[in-house]
Amino acid sequence: MELDWKNLSFGYLKTDYNIRSYYRNGSWSEPELTSDETVSLHMAATCLHYGQEVFEGQKAFRGADGVIRIFRPEENAKRMQSSAAYLKMALPPVDLFVDMMKRVVKANERFVPPYGTGASLYIRPLLLGTSAQVGVNPSQEYLLLMFVTPVGPYYKEGFNPIKVMIDRDHDRAAPLGTGHVKVGGNYAASLTSGEIGHEKGYPCVLYLDAKEKKHIDECGGANFFGIRQGTYITPRSHSVLPSITNKSLMTLAEELGLKVEQRIVDYEELATFEEAGACGTAAVISPIGSIYDPSNDRTFVYGDGTKAGPNCEKLYHRLRAIQYGEEPDTYGWMVEVK
Ligand SMILES: *Cc1c(COP(=O)(O)O)cnc(C)c1O
């Protein structure tokens, strides 16, 4: 397979197969590989009307030894279960989920980018409520589907910090709402502030807690962390999605000798961090150069605003090295695709 791996964008590129399992009459069907890129749905399916839809995101990597590995797929399986439970959907069993993920990666092996390009194979699982219903009730039937698409290296011009804007005029999730689960609706709700941010030149919007606007929640699709005096600090909040990248970075921060605190993070603490970052599957870490708050015209700058801090650098490289099989997988995070 010859693709311009280094210049792939984070878009959609057709691959050979996707994989599907259907939940009907209380059980999941034997997963089927298909080349059909479309989904046939009843127009009254609950996912279309009432947003009964949850998703996941993960990557497979071709390692230095040529072996293909997926990063912590069981964590995605468990998180999809918790998202599905909140939306009263059928829970895909962890084994079924991981097995489908391995199979869809294997079937699209020729799309897993070569080692050394910095590219990877993005995996997108979705779970949809499919029964025809007009009353507001959970669906009786579900479709679990996983497709893959190769994605290029996130940092084409180096590991450079991003500019972040605080949006106090919109919330992505309610205080006791769906912020902690990975539902499409949260993303729909973030599109307005995302566009405002982009128009003003900020690729990333940071949300404060929706109730009091006193604490830090997270970015639209990435968790937030700050580093101060040898401590990695990340918000604990009902409306923060538990990022698997963040969970892994907390482990690696301890390995590096940092202390780790997951707790309520006050807005004023933004002025005290030496480094800050946004973390998630897409980029691992986006170092944050500065955070602008238009409500009071304050700007919080990290370092000189143009270079990633030393701890962000170390954490990023350590996690990448584990994912690409360059350094020991000390914690057993990588799952081989055979
Ligand atoms: C998916 C997601 C993240 C990142 O989670 P990872 O498991 O690290 O990819 C962070 N915040 C939100 C809102 C998300 O939906």
Image (tube, rainbow, N blue to C red):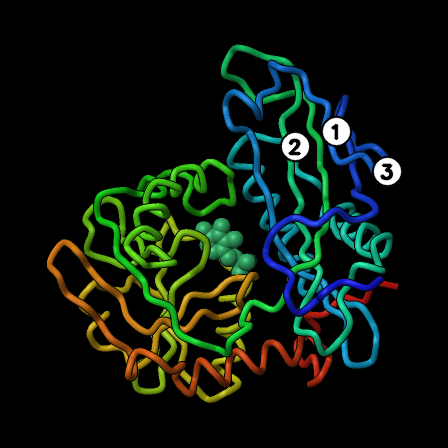
Cα distance in 3D space between marks 2 and 3? 18 Å
Q: Residue 32 bears which disc, if any?
A: 3
**Amino acid at circle 3:** Glu
Label 1 sits on residue: 23
Cα distance in 3D space between marks 3 and 1? 13 Å
**Amino acid at circle 2:** Ala
- Helix or strand or loop: what does disc 2 sit on? loop
- Residue 162: x, y in percent? 38, 68
Mark 3 or 1, which is nearer the eye? 3
- Residue 38: x, y in percent? 73, 31
Q: Residue at x 68, y 70 (%)?
A: 333
Q: Residue at x 45, y 69 (%)?
A: 286
Instruction: Please state if 261 lies on the left or on the right of 59 as rendered.
Output: left
**Amino acid at circle 1:** Tyr
- Residue 321: x, y in percent? 65, 81
Q: Nearer the viewer, residue 35 or 186?
A: 35
Instruction: Please state if 87 lies on the left or on the right of 95 as rendered.
Output: left
Q: Are marks 1 and 2 in contact (CB under 8 Å)?
A: yes
Indicate the quadrant where residue 126 lies: top right
Indicate the quadrant where residue 299 lies: bottom left
Q: Residue 90 bears which disc, if any?
A: 2
Q: Residue at x 11, y 58 (%)?
A: 296
